[in-house]
Image (spheres, rainbow, N blue to C red):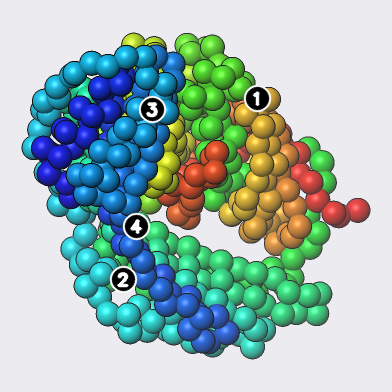
Amino acid sequence: MLDPALLQETIETALQSGATFAEVFVEDKRSTSAVLDDSKIEELTSGRRRGAGIRVILGETTGFAHTADLSPEGLQTAARAAAAAAQSAGNSNKSVAFTSDGSLPAPAAAVMPDQVSGSQKVALLQKADQAARGFQAAITQVSAHYADSRRRIQIANSEGLLAGDDQVRTLFAVSCVAQGDLGRQTGRQFMGHTVGFEIFDSVDVESMALQAAQRAYTKLSAVPAPSGEMPVVVGPGGGGVLFHEACGHGLEADIIAKSASVFAGRRGEMVANPMVTLVDDGTMAGEWGRYGVDDEGHLAQRNVLIENGVLTDYMWDYLRATKEGRPCSGNGRRESYQHLPMVRMTNTFLEPGPNDPAEIIASTDHGVYVAQLGGGQVNTVTGDFVFGMTEAYLIENGELTSPIRDGNLIGNGPQTLQDIDAIAGDFAMGSPGTCGKDGQGVPVGDGTPTLRVARLTVGGTAA
């Protein structure tokens, strides 16, 4: 990474515009991706992204410039461009003294993926393909994806902050298609963690492939989803995306500042059932949304957003926290050095509760059990949402019966938080995800225990 003296000179150049704040974000990211489709390797790529983004704040105006030229001249040019974009009000000289040496921590990886051969990564894909195809003749298509990345970042700012992080991520995914009399069905299984290639000492890709194949095969006998308002039980790890999208985004301070959230101005209010505690935690070891420091150099934290039903706090980046005169919460993130940071979630989840998962199902006379939610949409202003169900079952007389297909969950985030009437102790994190916001994608995780929402609208096709 860059010499602290060079970072200091770059910041001091940016401050000559009279700016109140200047920041340099340096990124060096290497990544590998391999894709197998129809038993053939369709893609085996590697890449590197390296550069710096410079942010300058002058009053209410932010100037930003980025460059792939990390030479002193390249950084000086970008610093002057960012300062000019912030609409200079006059010249001044300011010095910067960092409070640390900026050394990067050791990555949380025992086996660095870039030290593993491509043939070993391809062999994982082939093992998954063979296992899935051997499950049933009905499995007609198999796709598998391996990816890893190592992202080293360095952040320095005019307040003397100098920090860095070394983030390693490894991902594996299998998707299967089963062909039956009523058409084709898909089953998927994902795994992603902030660790190195040693993850495959504990994760069996053949078992992952069989799980994906089983899901696709089971759905061949699925019946149309019911319609109407009914109890919905969400399985462990299967519904975290609902709380990420329908509740988490509404608790991000930039959306709050725009009054574009149904949770704006409601700190201290009871916004959920008292058994609900919602947490965003960037420190969870190994989880997909984990990091050491955020993309503004602040330590990742465990932030309790809703505690026992009471809205306790929002998530903050530097800009919004400074305006409110409070500490950052470690939620300032950006997709790359080419982007400005903004408030983003990390690993968002509901804490486990006192109920037994089997008793939750047994005490539900008629409803839907969601093992895995898919993508969805949410209006943060109202909290209204709609999500697809990728794996779900009927609950009849307190038992899981037929798998269902083609169904959606329709509801309102705050109302859903109020309508949760049972939470079990079997917590699990869900699949790794990429959260999109204002054109930027960042890795995030989510999780839930088994829980029941007393009333949700199921949009199905059954008569």
| Sequence order check, earlier mark of 2 and 4 | 4
Q: Which residue is mark 4?
A: 49
Q: Mark 1 against mark 4, which lies toward the viewer? A: 4
Q: Look at 68% across and 56% down and name the residue there.
A: 393
Secondary structure of the residue carrying tag 4 is strand
Q: What's under tag 1, amino acid-wise? A: Val
Does 343 sit above or below residue 198? above
Q: CA distance from mark 3 to mark 2?
A: 49 Å
Q: CA distance from mark 3 to mark 1?
A: 35 Å
Q: Position of residue 183 (x, y in %)?
A: 78, 75
Give the crowd class for mark 4: few <14, some 14-19, many >=20 residues within 10 Å: few
Q: CA distance from mark 3 to mark 4?
A: 26 Å
Q: Which residue is mark 3?
A: 84
| Sequence order check, earlier mark of 3 and 1 | 3
Q: Residue furthest right?
A: 463
Q: What's under tag 2, amino acid-wise? A: Phe
Q: What's under tag 4, amino acid-wise? A: Arg
Secondary structure of the residue carrying tag 3 is helix
Give the crowd class for mark 3: few <14, some 14-19, many >=20 residues within 10 Å: some
Q: What's under tag 3, amino acid-wise? A: Ala
Using the image, tell me which numbered label, if any, was put on residue 381: 1
Q: Position of residue 421 (x, y in %)?
A: 59, 31
The reply to whether callout 1 and callout 4 are in contact (CB within 8 Å) is no
Residue 84 shows up from this direction: yes
The reply to whether callout 2 and callout 4 are in contact (CB within 8 Å) is no
Does 138 sit above or below residue 245? below
Q: Between residues 440 and 408, which one lies in front from this camera angle?
A: 440
Residue 364 shows up from this direction: no
Give the crowd class for mark 1: few <14, some 14-19, many >=20 residues within 10 Å: some
The reply to whether callout 3 and callout 1 are in contact (CB within 8 Å) is no
Left or right side of 52 for 461: right
| Sequence order check, earlier mark of 1 and 4 | 4
